Image: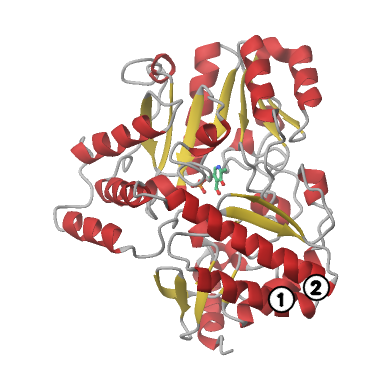
């Protein structure tokens, strides 16, 4: 497979961009080799500069749930772009996307749009601290909530991949108010609350972890967290930046029937444009300026093109049987991977919830970060390369989700499963 143009593009990028990329995991460091540079994408397929076409299971890290360049999203953007791209004033598009979010997501009575998932979690935490008058945040090791300082304690995703426990540049003082405990371990949460519960403003988590590879919550775990936080008058924040609109119209909170106080959104809600959002009970969201004293703002927040892409994407998801289809395709892929693993005797533990899944190169179970970290990352790197050469694009790290979209067909999944069989046979 010819990758010369991508390699040249990466060399050139490194002259001008820090590390040649604008988000570290894109640099392929965890799997070796040079990143592919994409020239265009359509449906479930992406095409690189050398003309190689791949079936895409990254989906821009989650947003592209209806596929790339979906005609409805393209039509919406075309209808808007000639009318101006940013006004810094309210538009009806913001209210329209806001209405859909409020109607779909059980915990959200009021929402505010921002530009990224990072901004969403950072701002939700500010609201939680203001509303409770308490300083501390409880989070789980391996859960990633974006790159704001106070949340870069034992983070997953790129940080975990590079083996850095947190990040230089984050002060001890900032992280002193962040408590980190293992995922899926209620006694650890109880202990933290028993010790400093009166100082904990909020517990924040990915209800289905996606940034240490996919790890579902144990049965009763989310309910347990709801009870403990309520007992201690702390807020429960679901970071649904990945799971929002992916697992169900109302996200993981609908899927698992547990209602948090605040919810963070991103990815799908922007339909591939830069959008994040946070929302929750009206009394909490009314703490925000201009109704309340908590400052939060954004020049491009609620950008009309971004709102339009989000509206069009949610409208596609609103059609009949979309979530059952996503689940079926996810199941087909998981089964294909399981078959390949047992046929060739290579340990591969699959965790899946709906259209998000991870195959961990190990026997499992994988219920928290330390178990995930035991995966054979050399195997993953080799597997990734074998898949790429068969024109299947997977996340360039073991500790990420594989995403299925509505644009994938059963035949695409079968092709990917066959490629996985070949790849695993060669490990
Ligand atoms: C669960 C979760 N929260 C927050 C973020 C941060 O979002 P963004 O990259 O848009 O800042 C991510 C990004 O991957 C995420 O997966």
- Residue 62 visible: no
Image position, residue 181 (x, y; %): 76, 31
Q: Find ligand 1 in the image and state its quadrant.
A: top right
Is disc 1 placed on a helix, strand or loop?
Answer: helix
Image position, residue 425 (x, y; %): 78, 79
- Residue 216 visible: yes
Q: Nearer the viewer, residue 412 or 56?
A: 412
Which residue lies under the disc numbered 1? 421
Q: Are marks 2 and 1 in contact (CB under 8 Å)?
A: yes
Residue at the spot 70% in from the left edge and 34% down from the top edge:
140
Spatial separation of the CA atoms under disc 2 and disc 1: 8 Å
Q: Nearer the viewer, residue 311 or 131?
A: 311
Q: Nearer the viewer, residue 162 or 189?
A: 189
Is residue 274 placed above or below 415 in the rendered structure?
above
Is disc 2 placed on a helix, strand or loop?
Answer: helix
Which residue lies under the disc numbered 2? 343
Residue at the spot 81% in from the left edge and 68% down from the top edge:
342
Mark sitting earlier along the chain (2/1): 2
Image position, residue 128 (x, y; %): 53, 20
């Amino acid at each position: 497979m010819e990758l010369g143009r991508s390699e040249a593009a990466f060399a050139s990028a490194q002259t001008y961009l820090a590390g040649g990329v604008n988000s570290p995991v894109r640099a392929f460091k965890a799997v070796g080799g040079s990143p592919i540079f994409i020239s265009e994408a359509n449906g479930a397929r992406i095409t690189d500069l050398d003309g190689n076409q791949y079936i895409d299971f990254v989906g821009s890290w989650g947003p592209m749930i209806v596929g790339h360049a979906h005609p409805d999203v393209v039509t919406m953007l075309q209808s808007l772009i000639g009318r101006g791209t940013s006004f810094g004033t309210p538009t009806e598009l913001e209210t329209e996307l806001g209405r859909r979010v409020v109607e779909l997501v059980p915990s959200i009575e009021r929402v505010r749009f921002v530009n990224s998932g990072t901004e969403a979690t950072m701002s939700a935490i500010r609201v939680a601290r203001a509303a409770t008058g308490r300083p501390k945040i409880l989070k789980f090791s391996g859960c990633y909530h974006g790159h704001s300082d106070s949340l870069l304690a034992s983070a997953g995703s790129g940080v975990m991949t590079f083996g850095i426990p947190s990040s230089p540049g984050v002060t001890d003082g900032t992280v002193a108010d962040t408590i980190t405990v293992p995922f899926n371990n209620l006694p650890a949460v109880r202990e933290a609350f028993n010790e400093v519960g009166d100082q904990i403003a909020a517990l924040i988590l990915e209800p289905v972890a996606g940034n240490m590879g996919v790890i579902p919550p144990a049965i009763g775990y989310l309910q347990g967290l709801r009870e403990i936080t309520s007992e201690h008058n702390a807020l429960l924040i679901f970071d649904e930046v990945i799971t929002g609109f992916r697992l169900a119209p109302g996200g993981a909170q609908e899927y698992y029937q547990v209602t948090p106080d605040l919810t963070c959104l991103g990815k799908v809600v922007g339909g591939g444009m830069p959008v994040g959002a946070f929302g929750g009970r009206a009394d909490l969201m009314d703490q925000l300026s201009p109704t309340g004293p908590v400052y939060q703002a954004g020049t491009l927040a609620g950008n009309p093109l971004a709102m339009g892409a989000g509206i069009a994407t949610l409208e596609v998801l609103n059609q009949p049987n979309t979530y059952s289809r996503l689940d079926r395709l996810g199941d087909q892929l998981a089964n294909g991977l399981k078959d390949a693993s047992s046929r060739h005797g290579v340990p591969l533990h699959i965790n899946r919830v709906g259209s998000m899944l991870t195959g961990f190169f190990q026997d499992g179970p994988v219920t928290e970060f330390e178990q995930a970290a035991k995966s054979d990352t050399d195997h993953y790197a080799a597997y990734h390369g074998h898949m790429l050469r068969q024109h299947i694009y997977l996340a360039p790290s073991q500790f990420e989700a594989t995403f299925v979209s509505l644009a994938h067909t059963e035949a695409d999944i079968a092709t990917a499963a066959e490629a996985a069989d070949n790849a695993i046979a060669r490990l």
